[in-house]
């Protein structure tokens, strides 16, 4: 069973972080791996395989031509939070050994508590979903991510 390894599957330090996610494209790539650990799968027809890639992160299924994005139907869809803030939050989360409170995150990033809380919630849902993706195996995450019985979909289908 595969595990997410610090420094390999997610950045272990701020320095790693800047190297991994220098721009939005890199960040979207990270989200894509998180969402489709076994490779892109069309949310409409289910076909696995490299999609066509269009501008603005649009992915097009080569079989049914369904257009999607890595954030469509996920907790990251339609966020107005700047990509840099998401990135910084992800970094905080990936290095927090004993969990990360919204208060701490808000303080660290200099954002409102409510925004920090909303981001943490989104990340937790994403991690739980990633863990449930059959081919991703066990995901080594903080209890902060996996606590509680999230009653969501077991796959990355359309929003419930
Ligand atoms: Zn398709």
Image: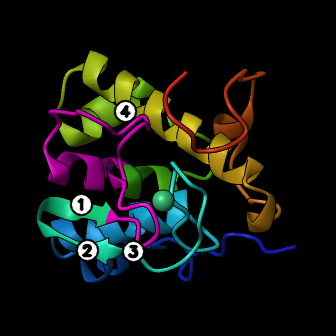
Quadrant of the drawing holding the N terminus? bottom right
Q: Residues within 10 Å of mark 4 (few under 14, many from 20)?
A: many
Q: Which mark is residue 58?
A: 1
Residue 16: image x %, image y %? 36, 80
Indicate if the residue with disc 1 has its beta carbon within 8 Å of ligand 1.
Answer: no
Label 2, secondary structure: give it.
strand
Q: Nearer the viewer, mark 3 or mark 4?
A: 3
**Outermost residue toward the front in this view:** 64
Residue drawn where x is 42% and y is 34% of the image: 75
In the rendered image, which residue does mark 4 sit on? Answer: 119
Residue 122 location, quadrant: top left
Q: CA distance from mark 3 to mark 2?
A: 6 Å
Span of residues in magenta? 60-89
Residue 121: image x %, image y %? 48, 28
Q: Earlier in the sequence, mark 1 or mark 3?
A: 3
Q: CA distance from mark 1 to mark 4?
A: 23 Å
In the rendered image, which residue does mark 2 sit on? Answer: 53
Indicate if the residue with disc 2 has its beta carbon within 8 Å of ligand 1.
Answer: no
Q: Which mark is residue 51?
A: 3
Q: Nearer the viewer, mark 1 or mark 4?
A: 1
Does the CB distance between marks 3 and 2 fall below 8 Å? Answer: yes
**How would you classify the magenta stretch by its main secondary structure?**
loop
29 and 144: which is toward the camera:
29
Q: Earlier in the sequence, mark 2 or mark 1?
A: 2
- In this orientation, does residue 95 appear? no
Q: Residues within 10 Å of mark 1 (few under 14, many from 20)?
A: some
């Amino acid at each position: 069973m595969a595990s997410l390894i610090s420094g390999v599957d997610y950045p272990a330090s701020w320095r790693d972080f800047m190297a991994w996610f220098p721009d939005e494209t890199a960040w979207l790539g990270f989200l894509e791996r998180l969402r489709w650990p076994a490779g892109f799968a069309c949310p409409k027809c289910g076909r696995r395989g490299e999609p066509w890639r269009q501008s603005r992160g649009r992915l097009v299924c080569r079989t049914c031509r369904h257009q999607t994005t890595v954030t469509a139907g996920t907790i990251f869809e339609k966020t107005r939070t700047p990509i840099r803030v998401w990135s910084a939050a992800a970094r905080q989360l990936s290095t927090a050994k004993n969990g990360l409170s919204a208060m701490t995150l808000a303080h660290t990033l200099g954002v409102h508590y409510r925004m920090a809380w909303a981001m943490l919630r989104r990340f937790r849902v994403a991690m739980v979903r990633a863990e449930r993706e059959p081919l991703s195996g066990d995901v080594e995450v903080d209890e902060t991510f996996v606590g509680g019985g999230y009653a969501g979909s077991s796959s990355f289908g359309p929003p419930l």
